[in-house]
Image (spheres, rainbow, N blue to C red):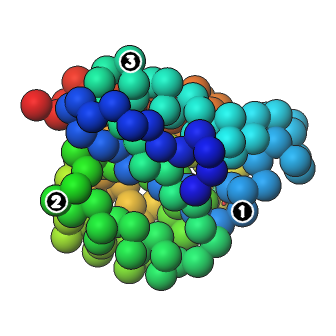
Amino acid sequence: MTDASSATDAGRGTILVLNGPNLNLLGTREPEKYGTSTLADVEQLAMDAAGAHGFTVDCVQSNHEGDLLDAIHAARGTAAGIVINAGAYTHTSVALRDALAAVELPAVEVHITNVHKREEFRHHSYLSPVCTAVIVGAGVQGYKLAIDFLAGAVA
Ligand code: CA2
């Protein structure tokens, strides 16, 4: 968690913003693909977007599948919704899919790049069928769009 990852004013609840493997490298490598925003920038953007709707955010990034599973489990009963960019685990992880299905929270899958314009193996997501919405190719603004959507979807 970074300094930008939490907000204190209690309001409508908390949105878990989950980032998976290698997304800690945002803004430091491959800017032509992933842009120049850092993970801290993304978390600040998420905090601002959530705050505008009266939500706080809990931002978690991990390169370890088990940590991501634990964060999803912990969201049950504590979070109003989940924004998840599972990185490459999107295309491999039945475990993350099962966790998202189990917690029964509205979840939005986000990808910075348009995975459908990329390699064939990125076209399939194990997560999409258990998510409420999917946003791809909008850059890091996808996180804001996801939060705006969740804020409208959550009672
Ligand atoms: O487009 C996305 O957001 C992805 O989830 C990014 C993943 C990729 O495996 C997915 O297919 C699509 C990769 C994240 C790697 O992040 C980096 C960021 C900066 C520099 C290097 C890697």
* Quadrant location of the C terminus in the rendered image: top left
Check contact, mark 1 vs mark 3: CB within 8 A: no
Say left or right for 7 vs 139.
left
The secondary structure type at the circle numbered 1 is: loop
* Quadrant location of the N terminus in the rendered image: bottom right
Q: CA distance from mark 1 to mark 3?
A: 28 Å
* Residue neighbourhood size for the residue with mark 2, other residues' Cα within 10 Å, grouped as few (<14), some (14–19), many (≥20): few
- Tag 1 residue: 22
Which residue corresponds to the image point at 59% horizontal and 67% vertical from the top-left?
A: 62
* Residue neighbourhood size for the residue with mark 3, other residues' Cα within 10 Å, grouped as few (<14), some (14–19), many (≥20): few
- Tag 3 residue: 52
The secondary structure type at the circle numbered 2 is: loop
State which tag comes first along the sequence, 3 or 2: 3
Q: Ligand 1 is in which quadrant of the figure?
A: bottom right
Q: Is residue 87 above or below residue 149?
A: below
- Tag 2 residue: 77
Asked whether mark 1 lies closer than 8 Å to ligand 1, one says: yes
Q: Position of residue 70 (x, y in %)?
A: 39, 75
State which tag comes first along the sequence, 1 or 3: 1
Q: Position of residue 6 (x, y in %)?
A: 47, 43
Which residue corresponds to the image point at 24% horizontal and 39% vertical from the top-left?
A: 13
